[in-house]
Amino acid sequence: MADYSLITKHKLLHMMKKMSRNSDSYVKRPGKDFSRSRKISFFDTLRFLLSLGAKSLDKELLDFFSYRPDLPTSSAMLQQRGKLKPNTMKVLFSVFTASLPKHSNFHGYHLLAADGSELSFPENKKEPLCHRKIPNTQKGKNAIHLNALYHLNSGIFDQVLFQPVHEKDEHSALITMLAQTEISSKVILTADRGYESYNTFAHILEKGWNFVIRGRQGDRGILSSLAIPDQEQFDVECPVVICKKHCRGTKEQPELYKRIRSGAKFDFFTEEQTEYPMKLRVIKLKVNEDLSEILFTNLSKEEMPVGMLQELYRMRWMIETAFSQLKYNLGASALHSKRIEYVLQELYAKVIMFNYCKSILFHISLPQKTSWKYDYQISLSTAVDICLKSWRCPNGTAPPDVEILLLKYKVPIRRERSFPRTPSPKAVIYFTYRIA
């Protein structure tokens, strides 16, 4: 509601003001950077980064400074941005996200989804770890991989981690994010086939969480070494013992002992502990006539029947929708720099504002009418514009009747629709081709 939009805005502004009072901890040259009175203060620099849209930098400055004749130049803004430490926006993201309420409304569980997505920005050969040649052309582009833990109940990113595209490692990223998250109560983590790994399973178990992770079919995945029935659908428990050595005892029970190959990683072996027992439940579901899915979980049949698991895994798609919204509604596909330091500043700012908008929307109740054919939800694309306008308003104010404005823009929820996924490479939006 409108009051909550002000509460959220004041919360974020308070955090930024607190950082501003201790700015020496967040600049490269303490005692020098932001020590003189300038048109753009430390606080204004942070607020400007959070307000960035997809226009050119000059037009963003015009909007931010309300078309004042004495507004600073884009060069001045770049100089001020360059004074920030690389982790400044990351700190703001962590503090702000930790302050947001996270709800557990799926049978008392927090639902988290893990996934990754590639973000492209204009070519810069001076960043070789991010540079990628575009096939069949003389051009190239730069890309960075976003890894995320997305809180499905509350609709916000709980953790994010960025990796240069040539150093992409989703398994290590997930393990890092697991260590960083502060959610410790009942949790179910969902993930797609790229996260199938005994090491990943073990890290989730050590965290005290539950998981539902899709597995590969065929000869390449974990499924190929398990004793499972030859049926179109099944739901079986498969206890396994992960081990280092391939001795007589392990060879005699291949259905129980699973030896980690020499090149694979398993973080819980020590000199004393060379075996790691694990109890997996493996489910094969028939999605339609031609498609089936494999799910690995540690949830019991009594607590989580197959139907609930299928519903839970279907909810994982919300993180894919969130990536699309982050890129095209918040503007993460139209960045204003090609230096990795500045790119990360903007990307953390985009995720902060995504959480800012979604947190406001979560607290707005949209009444449903029995005469409607569908249930409705607030249109995020319009809500982003309204929330960003609220953020840009000076003096801690917001546009009047934010709740009424948001409730005017509704879109139907069509739960049963599905379309074939046809991923295609997305073109980079260059600086000279921006929204007017």
Image (cartoon, grey):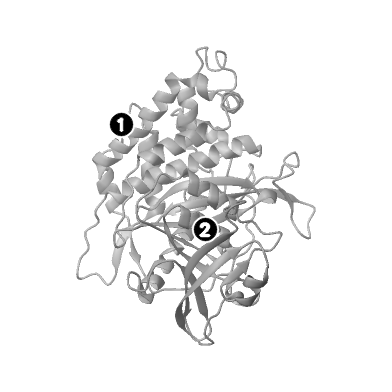
Closer to the observer: label 2 or label 1?
2
How many labels sit on residues? Answer: 2
Confirm or deny contact between disc 2 and disc 1 (CB under 8 A).
no
Q: Is residue 27 above or below residue 242?
A: above
The quarter of the picture where residue 396 lies is top left
Residue 329 in percent (x, y) is at 47, 51
Residue 210 in percent (x, y) is at 42, 60
What residue do we see at 46% from left, 38% from top?
93
Toward the viewer: 355 or 210? 210
Residue 118 in percent (x, y) is at 60, 53
Q: Quadrant of the N terminus?
A: top left
Q: Is residue 332 something one can see in this rendering?
A: no
Assess disc 1: are there few (<14), some (14-19) or many (≥20) residues with their C-alpha within 10 Å of its C-alpha.
Answer: some
* Residue 169 left/right relative to 327: right
Toward the viewer: 302 or 292? 302
What residue do we see at 53% from left, 69% from top?
240
Amino acid identity at mark 2:
Ala
Q: Is residue 380 something one can see in this rendering?
A: yes
* Residue 36 left/right relative to 164: left
* Residue 335 left/right relative to 69: right
What residue do we see at 54% from left, 47% from top?
176
Q: Secondary structure at mark 2?
A: helix
- CA–CA distance between discs 2 and 1? 48 Å
Q: Which residue bears the numbered disc 1?
A: 397
Amino acid identity at mark 1:
Thr
Q: Is residue 430 above or below residue 45?
A: below
- The label shown at residue 186 is none
Badge 2 or badge 1: first in the primary sequence: 2
- The label shown at residue 202 is 2
Assess disc 2: are there few (<14), some (14-19) or many (≥20) residues with their C-alpha within 10 Å of its C-alpha.
Answer: some
Toward the viewer: 206 or 271? 271
